């Protein structure tokens, strides 16, 4: 594959690079005026997600506007529950909401899974094909999925929550259904990622956004085996695993067939390297709120970040960029990296 900019793929392949690649979680979205304009002309978020040409357009916007080293396909982790038969709504200014939530074993048994569910997501694969065409090999395209625990959390809780205590209650009270649901979600994710790869994505990232809500023991039981299975199923492209808040699990994740590990901003690179050495590429982990600071401070902390990680690093934030982040702050972050060169030896 001949990409004009293959810095991300070379880094994931442990090759020596002149500088680290940079992209931002949630780069396609409300930080960009172009996104807000298009979004404002539509009936809602789901119209954007389910219309391949529009999804492709907003996927490419940050590549044009910010000059990042990768695109991430515009979609949502919640397309998986929907394909399994549990519809969601995206409520303006509130977030996702599921009119029906999982409350019984019968409901879990009824959910569609694997290829049968994944084939309902043709619009995503079409968006991937349209994006690849529009990118015209400028930068690689990242595909993604939520991790099984994070998706179960939404399907049981019904929407965002500080504690996800309904979902956690299910793990404690009904471990058997929980495992059945996690297995069905896992099978769907595997089929979905295979289809996305066949459609053209160059890298995949698994988002376990609510990993930090589980105790280490619960995470070991209800999350890690499923992530391990997904990572092992992805053979043709590199995998990045981001388990937000689950520092305790980094040594175990480093044993999986994942090429890179995403870090949130609450852990330093040196601590992670102390656990796992240079075995995996690390991604992250500037605090998204750092981008509210003054230009000079963003520059300084970005340089400190790359110096802390050394090589084998993909620069990113420690979580998705917040919608009200000043575009200038984002540009300072990206441009500081684009002007950086690793010191020789
Ligand atoms: O740029 C990209 O990263 C690609 C697009 C992307 C979106 N959602 C678009 C989106 C990605 C990778 C996601 C993943 C996602 N969705 C996650 C995991 C990543 C993370 O941040 O932890 C989660 C937990 C969700 C679920 C979700 N989707 C929530 C909680 C919300 C509402 C809150 C919010 O962030 O807006 C969404 C909506 C959503 N997904 C928007 C976008 C651009 C905002 C919709 C809009 O109003 O335009």
Image (cartoon, rainbow, N blue to C red):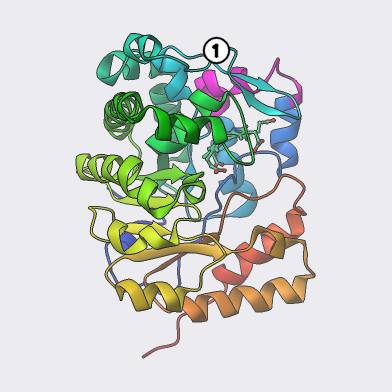
In the image, is residue 44 part of the stretch drawn in magenta? yes
In the displayed structure, would residue 284 be above or below residue 105?
Answer: below
Question: Is residue 80 placed above or below 240 in the rendered structure?
Answer: above
Position of 183 compared to 306: left or right? left
Magenta segment: 40-56
Identity of the residue drawn at 50% across and 80% down:
308
- Whereabouts is ligand 1, in terms of quadrant? top right
Mark 1 Cα shell of 10 Å, populated few (<14), some (14-19), many (≥20): few
Q: Residue at x 45, y 44 (%)?
A: 208
Is residue 6 visible to the viewer in this orientation of the structure?
Answer: no
At 64% from the left and 75% from the top, the residue drawn is 301
Residue at x 69% of width, y 35% of height: 35
Q: How many marks?
A: 1
Foreground residue among 156 and 268: 156
Nearer-the-camera pick, 255 or 327: 255
Q: The residue tagged with tag 1: helix, strand or loop? A: loop
Q: Main secondary structure of the magenta part?
A: helix
Q: According to the image, label 1 marks what residue?
A: 100
Extreme front residue here? 173
């Amino acid at each position: 594959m001949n990409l004009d900019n293959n810095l991300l793929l070379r880094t994931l392949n442990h090759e020596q690079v002149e500088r680290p690649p940079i992209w931002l979680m949630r780069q396609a979205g409300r930080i960009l005026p172009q996104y807000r304009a298009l979004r404002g002309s539509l009936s809602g978020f789901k119209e954007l997600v389910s219309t391949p040409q529009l999804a492709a357009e907003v996927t490419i916007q940050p590549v044009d506007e910010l000059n990042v080293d990768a695109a991430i396909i515009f979609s949502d982790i919640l397309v998986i529950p929907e394909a399994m038969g549990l519809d969601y709504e995206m409520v303006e200014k509130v977030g996702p909401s599921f009119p029906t939530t999982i409350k019984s074993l019968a409901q879990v048994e009824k959910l569609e899974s694997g290829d049968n569910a994944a084939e309902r997501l043709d619009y995503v694969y079409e968006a991937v094909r349209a994006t690849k065409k529009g990118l015209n090999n400028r930068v690689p395209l990242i595909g993604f999925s939520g991790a099984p625990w994070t998706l179960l959390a939404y399907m049981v809780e019904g929407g965002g929550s500080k504690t996800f205590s309904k979902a956690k209650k299910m793990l404690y009270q009904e471990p058997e259904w929980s495992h059945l649901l996690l297995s069905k979600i896992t099978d769907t994710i595997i089929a979905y990622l295979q289809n996305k790869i066949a459609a053209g994505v160059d890298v995949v990232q698994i988002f376990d956004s609510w990993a930090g809500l589980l105790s280490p023991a619960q995470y070991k039981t209800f999350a890690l085996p499923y992530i391990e299975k997904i990572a092992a199923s992805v053979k043709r492209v590199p995998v990045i695993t981001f388990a937000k808040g689950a520092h305790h699990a980094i040594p175990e994740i480093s044993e999986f067939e994942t090429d890179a590990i995403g870090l949130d901003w609450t852990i330093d690179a040196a601590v992670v390297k102390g656990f796992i050495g240079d075995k995996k590429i690390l991604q992250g982990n500037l605090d998204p709120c750092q981008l509210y600071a003054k230009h000079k401070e963003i520059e300084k902390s970005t340089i400190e970040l790359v110096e802390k990680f050394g090589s084998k690093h993909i620069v990113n934030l420690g979580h998705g960029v917040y919608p009200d982040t000043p575009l200038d702050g984002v540009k300072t972050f990206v441009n500081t990296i684009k002007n950086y060169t690793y010191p020789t030896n």
